[in-house]
Image: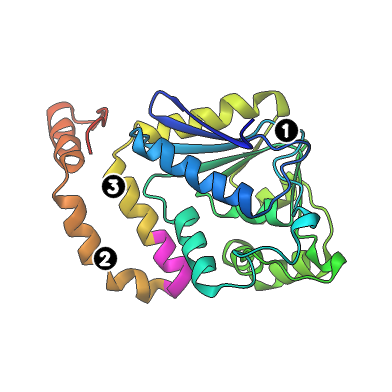
């Protein structure tokens, strides 16, 4: 049985972590996630929903893999390629977090554009307890979302945090009742999939550029991104719908 499955729900590519018992993270699981992303992209998905079929979203690293990993701490080129493949996938990504998102599991969720969590979920950057630092870029991505002081607190102390706290700190987007996680996260993914794909891709590029290099880095490519969007059918359909109806309602099924 595959540890990660990939299927289509309309225009949403659904990637499901299914490694018993707790989706513990190692190189093979990471490789399967990347392969699943490529599978749903090849089928024309316009958004990706990353979710879990296990009790936890991902409860951290597979300890048996320590000292054998190639992505995380031994190869700079592979690490950079991994983060680019996860974060710069050309469609919006939504993580649906149930149970624990700990250590590498939290870091995997942080590579997604949006995070929706069950009210029973919990989060922690736990590596400090075993003498490690977060190996998948968690510290810096927490700092991007919540600020340096909060990122240091989360990573240095290794405490568990509620989804409500993470939502309040700006790390995740929304908390929903556990029973509603599947429907709420799919609703977000389907709304993104129904939007203007190229425009959303441009917004994603702008936000990622700013997160990594500041406003100046995003501004440096603003005109390039503008030109890319201006040439799309999405832009033309949106303009046509606005002037035809006065409200700009349309369905984007092309670019």
Residue 212 covered by magenta stretch: yes
Category of crowding for the residue at label 1, using alpha-carbon neighbours closer than 10 angstroms: few (below 14), some (14–19), many (at least 20)? some
Viewer-side residue, 164 vs 192: 192
Query: Looking at the image, which residue is at 67% across and 63% down?
Result: 69
How far apart are the two marked residues, 3 and 1, measured between alpha carbons?
34 Å
* Quarter of the image where one finds residue 236: top left
Q: Identify the magenta region.
A: 207-214
Q: Earlier in the sequence, mark 2 or mark 1?
A: 1
Residue 159 appears anywhere in the view: yes
How far apart are the two marked residues, 2 and 3, measured between alpha carbons?
13 Å
Q: Which residue is mark 3?
A: 199
Q: Which residue is mark 1?
A: 54
Category of crowding for the residue at label 3, using alpha-carbon neighbours closer than 10 angstroms: few (below 14), some (14–19), many (at least 20)? some
Residue 39 covered by magenta stretch: no
Residue 222, disc:
2
Left or right, residue 159 beside residue 152 = right
Viewer-side residue, 253 vs 153: 253
Note whether 149 is above or below 108 in the view shown.
below
Residue 114 appears anywhere in the view: no
Which secondary structure, mark 2? helix
Image quarter in which the C terminus is found: top left
Viewer-side residue, 218 vs 245: 218
Query: Looking at the image, which residue is at 50% across and 28% down?
Result: 187
Image quarter in which the N terminus is found: top right
Which coloring applies here?
Answer: rainbow
Category of crowding for the residue at label 2, using alpha-carbon neighbours closer than 10 angstroms: few (below 14), some (14–19), many (at least 20)? some
Residue 80: percent from left, percent from top = 50, 68
């Amino acid at each position: 049985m595959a540890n990660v499955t990939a299927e289509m729900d309309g225009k949403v590519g659904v990637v499901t972590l299914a490694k018993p018992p707790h989706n513990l993270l190692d190189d093979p699981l990471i490789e399967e996630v990347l392969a699943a992303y490529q599978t749903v992209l090849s089928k024309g998905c316009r958004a990706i929903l990353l979710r879990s079929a296990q009790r936890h979203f991902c409860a951290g690293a597979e300890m048996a893999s320590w000292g054998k990993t190639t992505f995380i701490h031994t190869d700079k080129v592979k690490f950079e390629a991994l983060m680019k493949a996860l974060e710069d996938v050309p469609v919006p990504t939504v993580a649906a977090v149930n149970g624990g998102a700990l250590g590498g599991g939290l870091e995997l969720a942080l590579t997604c554009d949006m995070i929706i969590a069950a009210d029973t979920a919990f989060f922690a950057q736990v590596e400090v307890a075993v003498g490690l630092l977060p190996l998948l870029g968690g510290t810096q991505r927490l700092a991007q979302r919540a600020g340096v002081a909060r990122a240091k607190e989360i990573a240095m102390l290794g405490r568990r945090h509620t989804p409500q706290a993470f939502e309040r700190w700006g790390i995740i987007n929304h908390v929903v009742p556990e029973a509603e996680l599947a429907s709420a996260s799919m609703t977000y993914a389907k709304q993104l999939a129904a939007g203007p794909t190229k425009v959303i891709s441009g917004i994603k590029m702008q936000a990622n550029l700013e997160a990594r290099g500041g406003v100046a880095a995003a501004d440096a490519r603003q005109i390039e991104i503008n030109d890319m969007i201006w040439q799309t059918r999405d832009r033309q359909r949106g303009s046509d719908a606005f002037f035809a109806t006065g409200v700009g309602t349309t369905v984007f099924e092309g670019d």
